[in-house]
Image (tube, helix red, strand yellow):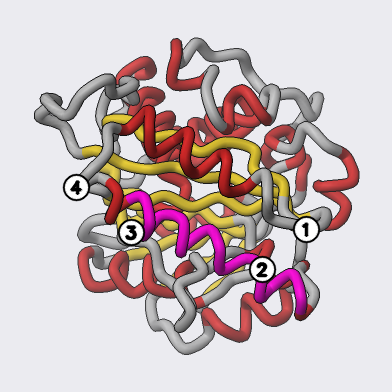
Amino acid sequence: MNTFSSYRNLNNALRNRKGSLGLVPTMGSLHTGHLSLVEKAIKENSNVIVSIFVNPTQFDNKSDLKNYPQSLKNDLKQLQKFNNVFVYVPDIQDLYPKNTISKKYNFGRLGKIMEGESRVNHFNGVATIVEKLFKIFKPNFAYFGEKDFQQLLIIKSLLKQKSLKVKIISCPTVRENDGLAMSSRNKLLNKKERKTATVLYRTLLEAKRLMNSSKPPEIEKTISTKFSNIKDIDLLYFKILTDGSFSDLKNLKSKENVRAFIACNIGNVRLIDNMILE
C-alpha cells in the first residue's frame, strides 16, 4: 500500500503500470461496506486507487461537516491488508487549489427530489469531486455502493453530461446483522439511537410485503402515518419510485425495478436506506 497526498505524485507512480485501473472514492471512516468495494475492485483490476477525502462542498450544514466521523489512522490500517492499492489522501488545496466552491450541474428532477430537496447543493458537491477524480486519474472502473442509490444515478448522469469514459460498478448494500445498512454515520449513534435505527430496514421490509396487497401511494401513506407515532425519530421522506427514471408509481405496470427509499433523523444523525421491492 502506498499513500499519496498529491495527485501528481500518484499519477507518476502509476505511469508505467499496465492493466486496468479501478477507483474507489470514499470519505473515510471505512467500514466493511467500503472494504467490500475495495475487494471487488482488486479482483477486477490490476491497479486500484482508494481515495479518502471528506468533501466540504457536499455538506449543506457546517455542524454536519464538523461532526462527520474521521479516522484516517484506522482507515490506513484497514487498507494495509490489501496489496497493490494506492491510497489518495489529498490536502484540500490539491482538489480545490483556488476556492472551495462546487460547480453547478443540472441533473433535472433527479437532483431535486429526496436528497436533492433535503440537502441543498449536496449533489453539486458530490459531482464536483467525482468529476475531478475521474479527470485526474482516468480510471477504467469506479465502484460505488447502492446504499447511496440516488448518488449512483447522479454519477451516471454526470458521465453522460461530461462524456467521461468510466464504467460505474454498483455494489449491493452491506448490512449489519440486524439489517441496518452500514454507514460511517452509524458511529455517531448512541446505544439507544442505534437500536432505534433498525426501523429503517424493518420499514423497507414492510413495504416489500405490502406491495402484494397495496399500491405504492397507499404504502407511502401507511408508512408516513406509522412514523408520526414513533418517538425519537423524524421521517424526512419515504418514497417508492422506479430505480431508473425515478418516476412516481400510480400503478404497477412499469417495467423498471421498483425501489423504496427512506431517510430519517435519529437524534442529530441523518440515515438513508433503500431496497428493491420488485
* Element on which disc 4 rests: loop
Identify which residue is drawn at 49% across, 31% down. 131
Q: Which residue is mark 1?
A: 232
* Element on which disc 2 rests: helix
Residue 184 place in picture, x, y as percent:
64, 65
Task: Name which of mark 3 and mark 4 comes first in the sequence.
Answer: 3
Task: Name which of mark 4 and mark 2 comes first in the sequence.
Answer: 2
**Real-space Cα distance between discs 2 and 3?**
51 Å
Residue 84 place in picture, x, y as percent:
38, 76
Task: Name which of mark 2 and mark 3 comes first in the sequence.
Answer: 3
Identify which residue is drawn at 44% across, 21% down. 110
* Element on which disc 1 rests: loop
**Real-space Cα distance between discs 3 and 1?**
55 Å
**Real-space Cα distance between discs 1 and 2?**
8 Å
Q: Which mark is residue 196?
A: 2
Q: Is residue 200 magenta?
A: yes
Task: Name which of mark 3 and mark 1 comes first in the sequence.
Answer: 3
Q: Viewer-nearest of labels 3 and 1?
A: 1
Residue 14 place in picture, x, y as percent:
41, 58
Q: Which mark is residue 119?
A: none
Residue range corresponding to the magenta coloring? 192-207
